[in-house]
Amino acid sequence: MTQKIWGGRFREETDALVNRFNASIAFDHRLYAYDIEGSMAHLRMLAKQGIITAEETSKILTALEEIKVELDRNEIPLDDYEDIHGLVETALIKKVGELGGKLHTGRSRNDQVALDVRLFVRDAIGAVTDLIRDTQSALVTLAEKNFELIMPGYTHLQRAQPVLLAHHLLAYYEMLKRDRERFQENFKRTNTMPLGSAALAGSTFDLDRDMVARELGFDSITDNSMDAVSDRDFVLEFLFNVSVLMMHLSRLSEELVIWSSREFGFVTISDAFSTGSSIMPQKKNPDLPELIRGKTGRAYGHLISLLTTMKGLPLTYNKDMQEDKEALFDTADTALICLEVMCRLLQEISFNAEALKAATGIGFLAATDLADYLVRKGMTFREAHDIVGKMVLAATDQGKELHDLTLDIMKGFASEIDEDVYEWLEPSACLEKRNIPGGTGPEIVQKSLNKAKEELKN
Amino acid sequence: MTQKIWGGRFREETDALVNRFNASIAFDHRLYAYDIEGSMAHLRMLAKQGIITAEETSKILTALEEIKVELDRNEIPLDDYEDIHGLVETALIKKVGELGGKLHTGRSRNDQVALDVRLFVRDAIGAVTDLIRDTQSALVTLAEKNFELIMPGYTHLQRAQPVLLAHHLLAYYEMLKRDRERFQENFKRTNTMPLGSAALAGSTFDLDRDMVARELGFDSITDNSMDAVSDRDFVLEFLFNVSVLMMHLSRLSEELVIWSSREFGFVTISDAFSTGSSIMPQKKNPDLPELIRGKTGRAYGHLISLLTTMKGLPLTYNKDMQEDKEALFDTADTALICLEVMCRLLQEISFNAEALKAATGIGFLAATDLADYLVRKGMTFREAHDIVGKMVLAATDQGKELHDLTLDIMKGFASEIDEDVYEWLEPSACLEKRNIPGGTGPEIVQKSLNKAKEELKN
Amino acid sequence: MTQKIWGGRFREETDALVNRFNASIAFDHRLYAYDIEGSMAHLRMLAKQGIITAEETSKILTALEEIKVELDRNEIPLDDYEDIHGLVETALIKKVGELGGKLHTGRSRNDQVALDVRLFVRDAIGAVTDLIRDTQSALVTLAEKNFELIMPGYTHLQRAQPVLLAHHLLAYYEMLKRDRERFQENFKRTNTMPLGSAALAGSTFDLDRDMVARELGFDSITDNSMDAVSDRDFVLEFLFNVSVLMMHLSRLSEELVIWSSREFGFVTISDAFSTGSSIMPQKKNPDLPELIRGKTGRAYGHLISLLTTMKGLPLTYNKDMQEDKEALFDTADTALICLEVMCRLLQEISFNAEALKAATGIGFLAATDLADYLVRKGMTFREAHDIVGKMVLAATDQGKELHDLTLDIMKGFASEIDEDVYEWLEPSACLEKRNIPGGTGPEIVQKSLNKAKEELKN
Amino acid sequence: MTQKIWGGRFREETDALVNRFNASIAFDHRLYAYDIEGSMAHLRMLAKQGIITAEETSKILTALEEIKVELDRNEIPLDDYEDIHGLVETALIKKVGELGGKLHTGRSRNDQVALDVRLFVRDAIGAVTDLIRDTQSALVTLAEKNFELIMPGYTHLQRAQPVLLAHHLLAYYEMLKRDRERFQENFKRTNTMPLGSAALAGSTFDLDRDMVARELGFDSITDNSMDAVSDRDFVLEFLFNVSVLMMHLSRLSEELVIWSSREFGFVTISDAFSTGSSIMPQKKNPDLPELIRGKTGRAYGHLISLLTTMKGLPLTYNKDMQEDKEALFDTADTALICLEVMCRLLQEISFNAEALKAATGIGFLAATDLADYLVRKGMTFREAHDIVGKMVLAATDQGKELHDLTLDIMKGFASEIDEDVYEWLEPSACLEKRNIPGGTGPEIVQKSLNKAKEELKN
């Protein structure tokens, strides 16, 4: 039978189906360490305020420590309880008798669960940002290792202009940098202490909320008890931040999938990080990036789930809000495993220099540079663009690239063109011309790499 | 170490992290009964087609039955396997040796998982539609039991016109009726057999796909192997149908929450189907409808999750699609428990006749009828609407209802008004005038109840 | 000043900001033809029932026809009205005087808007299903035209097995076929007539609802007035069906984008159906499939939008529901334009036979067939799979394909292999072996094409 | 015919359908002021860098100013253009001839559109945060005006404990404060200048990106050109921040709807801010909060829309991304109008002091305080909770409130209870006991009000 910490005004036992439906213990037991940590801080404060005696405090603290150890060891069966708060309180009363009933003085499950969830999100943000940094490091390492490699930059999945592979990889560094920032701001809003809000109106006891905040490492205390027990913004922010993070990882994953196709052949993933087929003996599949890409849906789904749940709820706490936890936990787990896998995967891929070089040579990737060349010779950009377009068309008809056209033929399109055009069209020359801040020139990319390494040190 | 059913062309062992990330056994083990059922049907067909011998078939069938029993009893540890298909095949080979390797003849995990998921959805639809019918029955029973009760019908949460409570409850009957229809159509598209599609191109063996379909109770076989292994429409439909179902339940839940507020006081939920507060001794909360309402977010989330995952995937199977299962399982579980709880809850609520009657008497609920009265006396509806609006304003100023106004005062607004107006404005008279098909008149509502009971018999 | 069809009980003019916020005329004017059509049917019924006279009816009908013409010609400024219903009624009163006030007899905006939206969805479904059929036809035509072409079938974007291009295209035919089915079922549930429900409780007038239904081509009338005015299931279904349709189109689009990359080079899109770059003169971009793929987000968004809006609304009509229309209109427009573009685009692409052939020859696409070959020689499939995997590895090391290995070398892996293996490994032989129903064998694909053409005739 | 700024390499005219589908001018014309502002800054920089002459610059600047004026006046028909960038460039060339073709030097539409959208979001954030502050002010004003009012605080829509109405209103102040913070952080990440990234790889011209940033008021320049043209994080953040804002407004709206029901009767909305019914003359509906609540779906939908579109896009720009704008524009418009309406609405509601007082007196709202009373007398909280629960049950049976029980009866439950209990149970006493930080005590709430007013000054 489920054990409850309420019931005086009820005449009938709760129905078994109701217990099964209502109980959150199946998932919120995951918060047990936070719940006990919060209870201990609350207790020490009650003692300091003279609301309970030092002796009582000591007994309860010892018992809570034991309960923590028992939960660490899975020694307390979960099924008998409504939620983790009830479990801990009941276990406590079993150990210390009636005295245990004092723990809940000046507290409600409403502010308690708000506290526990904040402690969880705080840790989750820490773990996620650590792994984001590791993934950024992996990108930087990969970029440095392959600094010499030039590849086609794409728009619309069409070859556009030559870029340094390092430049391409650093684009993801930037995305992850924004992700980290968002999580840090998320942390700031998470790190405020709700205890003392009681059910919704604040406690009648003379609680020292600041002391509890200090004990638990919070920066501040919440300013309005009604808001404090019905606020899940910090969870929504976490879900959103993971959604954007996953979107970024989905883009990198898409590229890894495309690049490891036989047609592109830019990348080889190690055997240890690939999988096979139950029927096709030759298959070696990029399952990891595919699965990361697929898990983007999971993050979006959880975000919509909690947004939907919170929509239109009157103040203050409503049972609907119990639905926050599973979405949160699964989102945190998803972010962590995907980052861990991506980080390792980036160490397990090798680039095929031949394929990259060959791809960069075909597809008129220097066409923009040729237009810019003509601008330097006095044309307006729009004219130059038009003329180069016609040259591309002519070359295509002859199965040639721009640099395959003779100077005579080129001059037929624009008399301004000189012998120096051939050097100008070299992929490496295209890069050298782009040492503008943010550009793909080797010098500026090297600077970006250095800057990134500096940032990662902090 | 994870056991795999591929690997010949791989030089390195799969990394442990990769196994942990890729493996679906933690959730797809739930498909084991379907997987074995499908394997047995496949096997019997292989035998009939002479692809394996009767003796071999018999040995494998016996072993599969044993494995089924062992899985029923949780005797096979899951952690060592990549997925349920690998688990079953490996367990089989342990039992019958090399021979077990014949089971996968003419089959791929791609068509196998498509089969298993279809079998799951088929059953889930069956269970959900059964519970929908039960909930419809509970609504009908509740409506019949309270057939005499009149209550305010609302628009914009403002009292609008008197309605029969039974009529209000039957509105939900109609919603659930559409839900059932949608699930039945979902079933039809689910009930087609994909096996024989192999990895993507169809098998090279002379399989009798129709026989497998018959054995497994499918209506038809899939028509295109590439579509068959990459189609998850039937899962999406299920997720959508549950989303709409949950939306309906969220509306009913919202009403139950509002109706059990002290301010409305229309409904009392039994103690056995309510819960209390850890801090406020007086509280009796409508947790159940709140939680159902909250779980709507979960359904919407899973729908968006799989829609997102499927977006932009090239043919045919991609690993992303592994993400279909957890969303599906949780959605099915959510629908089933919410229906079960709602169905029971409807048996545990009682309506407060006094409160309903009092509420129906206040708020000018007969104003439309008064306008219609004036139309019958020759006014256009627009004039009548305007005059009654002014009468409402005057009555409000005097703290009166329309029927409290004297005939003289009424005639001051419209000379057409006669003594018979008072009877005309009675709530029961308002109902009697609405025996139009679909209306709230007692006769027509009784007919709807009878029709509903007929429909539920089938 | 906004003209209203209510206001008797109001002391103050509505605030201008409120009018601006509340008014739906900016978008619901699009329903005008449906609104007038519905009003005419309602009117003829009122006349038949003797609620208004023949003469009155005739005057109003004539005026409504005039208003229809004026709206067709954009001669009525929209800004002065709250919604399309108010606009029509006010215009009517301007034309025929007080008499126009009779049109709203026995009707509310609640059932009127339900009617108008149903009429819109009915037409939208018709237009969408027509274009789906056209797109299916374009797929069939393209498949027939390129029937000889063999290409790599993919899983995980890795070459898997040879397939007929026609078979690949028919996979999309199947998806669209399910889409059509879903829309047809959606139509069925849309095609029921809500008028007579009035505000929520049914009308007090003796309306002949069946007559109105017949006049407007509805199959049935709604069964419960409270449900009728608060039901938007049929809109949600439409939004979902378009979401799945767009998901299908996004997959085809993704393939067209990948196929028209220089690396794949499978497809050329005509110049008339491609676009260029403002800066890069050489670019020819597959903008159309990209934009279709991108618009998938739009469909998903609208679906979530209305699901969110409907969540937790108490019965019956609430103003929130006004939000259904813009999502609906934009979804219909999106589906129609995307289908129209995809349909035309399929006529503007040409396949590169050389590239397809070359791609099919490389990547061990016959490996599964070799395993099946060994099964026919007596091996279990699992053994065969393992051996072929090792052969693939060996061939890869030598930069060879399977068919490049000498018979001796092959026999070293499996003595069962004979000279006939080389023929067995030919792409065309791989296809011929797959004339199983649903497979990619030319005979069976031809049958599927014929079946498709039959279906399209109906 | 649509005028294009590319086309040299194209042999065929773009198809009319393609133009219609691809063109973004119908919505991106809204960016024209930003586009011209950006072009002017770009131009001045080109001049300073000596890439174009002072005279050329002057001519183009003058022409751009003219074009701005013409667009302000709607004098340029939009239909002929692909997008706003093409429109401006074409209009420029019409005015200054070939020279106009120089404007696009060192620029691509990819970085140009990134710039325009950033300028738009920057302004949108400014406007939204201003209105958030206004709404916060309206809350503070309303709270001050009604500072004396005590009302029931709710959990689960059940009366829980007495709270100050001001405290309740300040909970929304807190939510909006977090919203403002999020938008400000959003601004920070938006306010970085992408121009100079060109198509994707950076420009070959010697651009002074920092100068352009300064001219346009940006804090920094983007660090990676490939990221700069494919980053829409700042748009997603805006969509998310509006979604959370709308969620907050939906909660307040739900409360306003519930509070203005006749059953609650806590609030009266002015006639000027209410609407009526086309059929029911007595109706006065809270349309405004309902519509705000309903528009929450719109915000969530747009968020999911863009998240979906961005999922899995390879670098760098893809046409899919054109879909960002309509979602963005509509989200900004929705946030602005909803805030404006809510802000005004808060000035148009009046609270019914009688109803609030009556509601606070019934429902055992002091039960927690009674338990706390017993704790002070030496009981553990859990015992006290249980005893008070039983007292509530007994009182309920007698149709009484706690304070109606005689001291004798009370002592029967707990001998510790004394005469002072009656004072202790007064609503005002319940408040006085809660002057803990964050609590609902009048002193602390007054401090919160003062703090809020301070914050709003900044």
Image: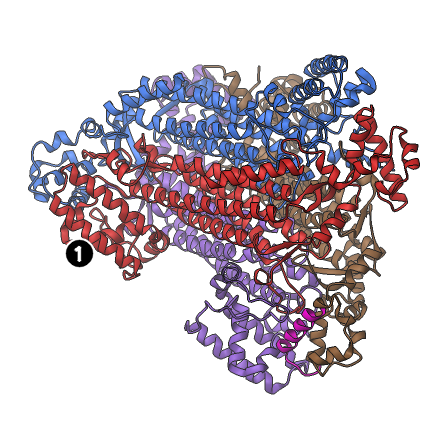
Chain colours: A brown, B blue, C red, D purple
Judging depth in this view, the residue of C253 and C433 nearest the camera is C433
Q: Secondary structure at mark 1?
A: helix
Quarter in which the N terminus of chain B is drawn: top right
Foreground: C12 or A195? C12
Q: State which region is magenta.
A: A377-395
Q: Is residue B161 magenta?
A: no
Horizontal relation, residue C104 to residue B36: left or right: left
Q: Nearer the viewer, residue C244 or B263?
A: C244
Q: Which residue is mark 1?
A: C95
Q: Position of residue A141 (x, y in %)?
A: 82, 53
Left or right of D88 on screen, residue C17: left
Callout 1: chain: C
Judged by its main secondary structure, the magenta piece is: helix
**x and y, in percent, of residue A203 in the image:** 52, 34
Residue placed at 80% from the left, 80% from the top?
Answer: A419
Name the spot of residue D204 as percent of width and height, x first: 72, 73
Front position in the image: B35 or D182: B35
Q: Measuring from the top left, give residue C214's x and y in whole percent.
A: 27, 37
Q: Residue at x 65, y 61 (%)?
A: D229
Let me know if residue C165 appears in the view: yes
Figure quadrant of residue B430? top left
Q: Is A18 placed above or below C163 here?
A: above
- Residue B221 vertical placement versus B370 (above, below): above
Is C118 positioned to the left or the right of B420 in the image?
A: right
Q: Is residue D436 visible?
A: no
